[in-house]
Amino acid sequence: MSKEVIESDLAPAAIGPYSQAIAANNLLFVSGQLGIEASTGEMPDCVIEQTKLALKNLDAILKKAGCGPENVLKTTVLLDDMANFGIVNELYGQYFVSPYPARACFAVKQLPKNAKVEIECIAILE
């Protein structure tokens, strides 16, 4: 099996020993994206802005691989607080359109950089 590293300058660089995404066997595996502004490395405190940026970063990586939200098969959404589920859901629903990808959503004790939201996905490459 061959695999290709996908990296976009329009999304923040990985903050650990991992790739932004890996393409293999017509699938794209996108690492979790935080709400970090790629150009500055800054992360706003607001869950709304973090969610918008996480989706923007996800989109930049998808586009670098030649696909978009319509190619996404599954997402995993990590939240630091389920109280934010509603607003994250609303913004998520503005980015993804029907038929929506499969999804899991979890509240976790803590996210990297004390983020409020992290989103990863698996997409099909066409």
Image (cartoon, rainbow, N blue to C red):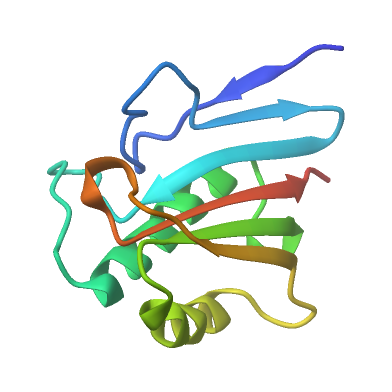
Report the quarter where the N terminus lies.
top right
Q: Do we see residue 37 in this rendering? A: no
Residue pictured at 31% horizontal, 28% vertical: 15
Q: Is residue 47 left or right of residue 67?
A: left
Q: Is residue 84 visible?
A: yes
The residue sitting at 30% across, 56% down in the picture is 35
Which x, y percent locates residue 93?
Answer: 56, 83
Res. 74 image quadrant: bottom right
Q: How many marks?
A: 0
In the image, farthest residue toward the top: 2
Instruction: Residue 99 in the image: state x and y as whole percent.
Output: 80, 79
In the image, 25 versus 43, the foreground residue is 43
Residue 110, position as x, y percentages in the image: 33, 50
Q: Is residue 43 left or right of 3 when viewed as pictured?
A: left
Residue at image x 30%, y 41%? Answer: 112
Residue sitting at x 53%, y 75%: 95
Horizontal and vertical percent position of residue 13: 33, 30
Query: Residue 37 or 125: which is nearer the viewer?
Result: 37
The vertical placement of 101 against 38, above or below, is: below
Q: Nearer the viewer, residue 6 or 90?
A: 90
Residue 117 quadrant? bottom left
The answer to whether 8 is drawn above or below residue 68 in the figure is above
